[in-house]
Structure formats: C-alpha cells, structure tokens
Image (cartoon, grey):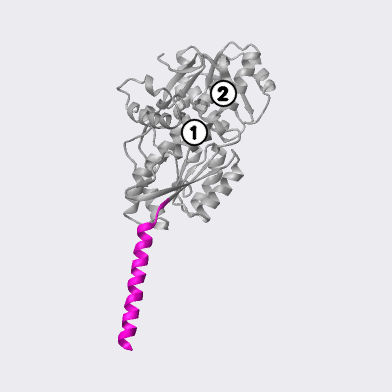
Amino acid sequence: MKSAMRWISATCVAAGVLAAWSGAASAQVKIGVTVSATGPAASLGIPEKNTIALLPKEVAGQKIEYIVLDDATDSTLAVKNTRKLTSEDHVDAIIGSTVVPNSLAMIDVAAETATPMISMAAAATIVEPMDAKRAWVYKTPQNDILMATAIAQHMANHGVKTVAFIGFSDGYGESWFREFTKAADLAKIKVVANERFARNDASVTGQVLKMMSRNPDAVLIAGAGTPAALPQKTLKERGYKGKFYQTHGVANNDFLRVCGKDCDGTYLPAGPLLVADQLPDSNPVKKSALTYKHAYEAAYGAGSVSTFGGHAWDAGLLLQRAIPLALKKGQPGTPAFRDALRAAIESTKDMPASHGIFNMSANDHAGLDQRARVMVEIVGGKWKLATD
C-alpha cells in the first residue's frame, strides 16, 4: 500500500511539473492595442490599425497575440479599452492611443496595473515630467518642441515676423501653443492671435476673422488629421494671403485629399518617413523608413503609407527589441515580465525606426532627436522635401 501511495504521489508531482512546464512553454506575449479607427482621428487610426496587422506574430521563439480595440477618438472609451485589456485580457503591454487626450487619460490605468504603454500621440506631456506614473509610459511620435523649433526657424528664414495660431481645443492644441510660443520667442517672432476649435467643428469663421484682423505674416494650424483642413480652407475662402504652416499631425494622404488645392504651398515638419524616397542616401533614417514603407505598401497598395502607421510600426520595433530581454527575467503574463519589459524599453539605444533613431533613458521616454524631422512643402497635392 505504501509503495502504491508513493507511486501515486510521484506521478502527481511529475504531472504537476509537466503541466507547469507546458504552461510556461505555451505562454504567449499579449499586446493590447487601442486606436482611433473611427471618429475625427480615423485618418490617423486606420493606418495604425493596419500596421498592427503587419507586426510579427513570433519574437524570440515566443508567440505574440495582438488584441486590437477601437476607441472612436473618445477618451472615455480609450480608458474603458485599457481597463479591459489589462484586467480581462491580462496583456503584457499596451500600444495606444492615437490622439493626445486619449493617451493622457490612459496613463493612470497603465501605471495602476504596472503595464508598459507606448503611445502613438505626440504631446510631450504624455511622458513629461517624469514621475512614478509616466515611468510606465513611452511614445513614438516626435515631441512637439522638436517640430515647433523647426517651424519657427523656417519662419524666421523666410521673413515671418508675426504669426497667428489656431489649434485644437484639447491637449494637442494646448501642447502645441505652449511649445510653439517658446520656439517663436527664441526666433523673435510675435504670436499675435491664439484661437481654438474642436475636432468635430463644422465652422471656424469667427476664429478666422479674428486672426485676419491682426494681419499676421503667417498662420500656424495645430490640428491633426482631416479636421486640420477646416481653418486653412476657411482662411483661403476669406482671402488670406500670408504663409501657411501645419504640424506633423496632418502628414497623411487623407489630409491632402480633404484640403485639396487650398493647401498648396503649405509647410510642415514631418518624420523622414513622409518623404523617404526623396531623402539623400546619407540620411541615417532612410533605410529603416523605407523598410516600413515597402512593407506597408506591399500589403495595402502603392502610395498608401502614412506617417501615423509608422508610429505603430516603431512601437512594434521597441517591443520586438525588448521582449527577448524581458524573457530572461520573467514569463509572459506575470508582473516580473511586465516590469522587465518596461525596463528593456527604457534601455533602448541607437535603434533605427521609421521616424528616427531611438535612444531612451530613465528621463527620456520619447527618445528622438533632430534626425527625426525634416521640413516638407505641399506642392501640387503631394509631399515635397523642402530644401530651403
């Protein structure tokens, strides 16, 4: 009887060890994604969603599952998605969201659940100032100040002395106004108007008339996606003859389609991806930008690539580099793995991506420098690398 009991006990232990080993071997990394695939930011979110489908399903021998949700450009829904992904799906990392208000709203959940989050929105406030919450948050778009200084310098080089500003009435517009006024002051350019509009507004006539009454040399429109076309079209209709500038938030073909001929001659800073084919071979980002461009267009057609999809691609690259490092510290689905993943992303150095070269640190969770921007002009409804 004792012999039989010992045999049963040994068998149970062996079975338990085998089950544990099998569970560890079959564990997969889960990446939660929330994008604005519908709503005002759909022209940004759709290429991001398309790009997630191109990311590898296996890294370092580990299967990767992507759980993609739509937040409809709504911050409340973005938070709901984040809670579902962390609490129900138990994801190891989050990519999202598309826009600044959504991303800012998600930070608390990411920090509360100790889940690394990589935002695809631009405002520096997503990752600054660094604190216990933002220690879990990264982002792939260029900081607004990096792009704002490029605009201010271009304005100064082209004789602009006064500028009127109109931006979204949310975190994106506020961040841009704050950063651009700093850059404009350094370039000795006076900001003579500060107006706002909502992403879903149908008219900005009142704001445009106020701006034009100040007779500015140039106008900067701080919007993203197709809604940013509205102020420019209204200014054109009202006969404004000054220079136009947009932000990198409009760097997609849907904006060109909606804005049409009213946007010819407009300048904007953008990631090198937007004009990757036009970059000199000496540009350090050209090769990595073209890698993404070719992958996206092979799947979705010639000319379909979007800079916003590039932000999702770069988030994927950060995770592809970090996952093998994190696997040395813990198994997917565990707090140890999530913490190791966060630390691994923070240790990223000299990683070429579609928009620039990433160098993260404990105090810099954006990681891009001047190699992540170029000035672009809209000419004949197409993007052209600006050379002056």
Quadrant of image for the N terminus = bottom left
Q: Which mark is residue 137?
A: none
In this image, 217 relative to 3: left or right? Answer: right
Q: Nearer the viewer, residue 174 or 296?
A: 296
Q: Nearer the viewer, residue 134 or 92?
A: 92
Q: Specify start and end residues of the magenta stretch as a single range.
A: 1-29
- Residue 55 x/y as whole percent: 41, 40
Tell me what residue is drawn at x 58 percent, y 49 percent. Answer: 80
- Residue 18 x/y as whole percent: 34, 67
CA neighbours of label 2 inside 10 A, class few (<14), some (14 to 19), many (20+)? many
> Is disc 2 placed on a helix, strand or loop?
strand
Above or below, 318 against 155 in this view is below
| Mark 1 → mark 2, Cα distance in angstroms | 23 Å
* Amino acid type at mark 1: Pro
In this image, 200 relative to 66: left or right? Answer: right
Which label's residue is closer to the chain start, 1 or 2?
A: 1
Which residue was labeled with disc 1?
47
Which residue was labeled with disc 2?
221
> Is disc 1 placed on a helix, strand or loop?
helix
Above or below, 195 against 344 in this view is above
- Residue 191 x/y as whole percent: 56, 21
Tell me what residue is drawn at x 61 percent, y 45 percent. Answer: 76
